[in-house]
Image (cartoon, helix red, strand yellow):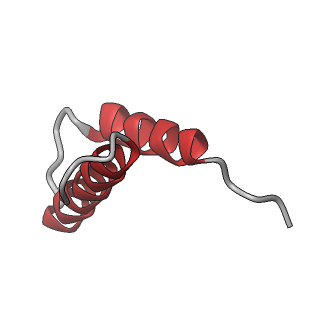
């Protein structure tokens, strides 16, 4: 099984966010996007050694 690089995960989050940013009608998709962006933000803070 392939290990995921952190950059792979961040790229996937950005790709999903970009493709769904316009015209999100389904609230479930909006919730998923908000969750993914929160995870991305958390990971980026951790990478920088910031306070989480």
Q: Does 51 appear above or below 45?
A: below
Q: Is residue 23 left or right of residue 40?
A: left
Q: Position of residue 5 (x, y in %)?
A: 65, 47
Q: Is residue 48 left or right of residue 28?
A: right
Q: Which residue ends up furthest to the right in the rendered image? A: 1
| Picture quadrant where residue 3 is located | bottom right
Q: Does 19 appear above or below 46?
A: above
Q: Does 20 appear above or below 31?
A: above
Q: Does 12 appear above or below 22?
A: below
Q: Which residue is drawn at 36% across and 34% down?
A: 19
Q: Where is residue 10 in the image (x, y as percent from the top left)?
A: 46, 42
Q: Which residue is drawn at 44% across and 35% down?
A: 15
Q: Position of residue 16 (x, y in %)?
A: 40, 42
**Closer to us: 15 or 41:** 41
Q: Which residue is drawn at 24% across and 62% down?
A: 35
Q: Which residue is drawn at 34% across and 52% down?
A: 46
**Closer to us: 46 or 18:** 46
Instruction: Please state, as top left, top right, bottom left or bottom right, where the N terminus lies in the image.
Output: bottom right
**Closer to us: 10 or 22:** 10
Q: Is residue 2 left or right of residue 37?
A: right
Instruction: Please state, as top left, top right, bottom left or bottom right, where the C terminus lies in the image.
Output: bottom left
Task: Report how many numbered discs are placed on residues in the image.
Answer: 0
| Picture quadrant where residue 2 is located | bottom right
Q: Position of residue 43 (x, y in %)?
A: 36, 52
């Amino acid at each position: 099984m392939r290990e995921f690089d952190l950059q792979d995960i961040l790229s996937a989050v950005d790709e999903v966010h970009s493709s769904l940013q316009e015209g999100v009608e389904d609230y479930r998709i909006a919730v998923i996007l908000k969750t993914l962006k929160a995870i991305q933000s958390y990971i980026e803070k951790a990478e920088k050694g910031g306070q989480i």
